[in-house]
Image (cartoon, rainbow, N blue to C red):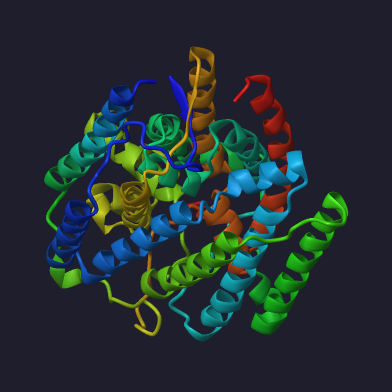
Amino acid sequence: MQRCGPTRRSSDGLFRVKRVPLAAVLAAFFIFLALAVSIRQAVLLLVGVGMGMALAGARFGFTTGWRQLIEQKDPQGVAGQVLLLALASMAALPLLGVFPELHAALGPPSVSLLVGAFVFGLTMQIADGCGSGTLYKAGLGVPLNMGILPLFALGSFLGSVHLDGWLALGQIEPVGLAGVFGTAGALALTLVLLACTLLVVRAWVGPGRQWIERRWIWGAVVLAGLATLNLLLAGQPWGVVYGFGLWAAKASVGLGLFDPAANAFWGQEGNAQRITQTVLMDVTSITNIGILGGALWIAARSGDTRATPLDREQWVVGLVAGFLLGYSSRLAFGCNIGAMLSGISTGSLHGWLWVPLAFAGSMVGVRVRRHYRY
Amino acid sequence: MASSSKRMWQVVFWLGLLSFLVWDWTASPPVDLRQEPPLIAAGSGQVITGGHCSMAK
């Protein structure tokens, strides 16, 4: 058994998909979506493919960036993420102010959010991937992440099933910074808070550090552009977790194991309707599929993979962490994408609450990871 | 893990995903193309109601 990460080139027996047939498959899927579902979903597939290519090509790992900051005092990954957040905010907040059709990623500040973000941050270090990280690493062919993906989906589904109970522990209404301070005020506050984040990081890492690498810069620029495109086309910010939960919900209903009408979350009109429709009509599902395809394209191009043996205990711990990752992502109202990137860039207070809790969880998670010798 | 085992993992993963999507498509009601959402939500004047992970309901 092995642990793999997309960091070194290797030719040790990858599932080598040729790029031309893969491009033909993606093109055929695009045409199918355009003819049988909608032009919008077809274009969103391409947006997702671009996201997957950027995530895998730039190795834009949220989890790794945080771990390198904690363990090695290397600020490059976090600096890249702050750049991404700043660019995405500068695009999203003005657009939300201009177009009333667009939605911000507003999650409720709640006990559920605090618990969920901490557990998510902890388990993402063990599973070596957040929501987007699990997707693109699965697309690259990393065995642990491929094994985690269905468990992530199951956890995300069960988290949404139990969400009502978690919210009963305490919540307030979602807070949008644009609603409180106006668009310009919200953007200014967001950029100031991001600058403060860099100052805290500077205080932690000390002087004489390299702050950013080229791949983090182009990754941040491309991902910010694609996240903005997602917002303009879909009317909502980029998300990952909802799609996973929907897949497991559909499978559970199909197997006769779950009655959505009896559940507070899935019984809601919009969610109940999406369960009855094909997942190809769902925005997050289609970008998730695109991310997998985009990462597979990168794997086909470069053969990026690294293999380190994983023992049975590491596999079990990793898979359990993957399940908890999915469960906690629903309690936290998103992962690094839905809560952190989309929440912060669209002015949601819940994004700013999510980050410190998830980072605190990651500080524990890197120790757990070390304990199990990952 | 031998390379053949890795290959098997990937084949199982992609076949599993493909099987799910095929089952989902065949088990779901046909898409009503007359209700197609606008290509670009911004400026369309239509209320967009997609699922998102930040949603509590």
- Marks counted in the figure total 0
Q: Nearer the viewer, residue A211 or A364?
A: A211
Q: Residue at x 35, y 21 (%)?
A: B2
Q: Nearer the viewer, residue A294 or A299?
A: A299
Q: Residue at x 48, y 65 (%)?
A: A237
The quarter in which the N terminus of chain A is drawn is: top left
Q: Quadrant of residue A264?
A: top left
Q: Nearer the viewer, residue A183 or A341?
A: A341
Q: Quadrant of residue A188?
A: bottom right
- Residue A349 visible, this orientation: no
Q: Residue at x 73, y 46 (%)?
A: A69
Judge whether A35 appears above or below A311 on screen.
Answer: below
The quarter in which the C terminus of chain A is drawn is: top right
Residue A106 in percent (x, y) is at: 57, 61
Residue A269 in percent (x, y) is at: 35, 54
Q: Nearer the viewer, residue A294 or A98?
A: A294
Residue A261 in percent (x, y) is at: 34, 41
Q: Residue at x 32, y 42 (%)?
A: A247
Q: Is residue A254 left or right of residue A77?
A: left
Q: Is residue A55 left or right of residue A14?
A: right
Judge whether A228 appears above or below A256 on screen.
Answer: below
Residue A369 in percent (x, y) is at: 64, 27
Judge whether A159 appears above or below A83 on screen.
Answer: above
Q: Is residue A158 left or right of residue B20?
A: right
Q: Is residue A112 left or right of residue A199?
A: left
- Residue A196 visible, this orientation: yes
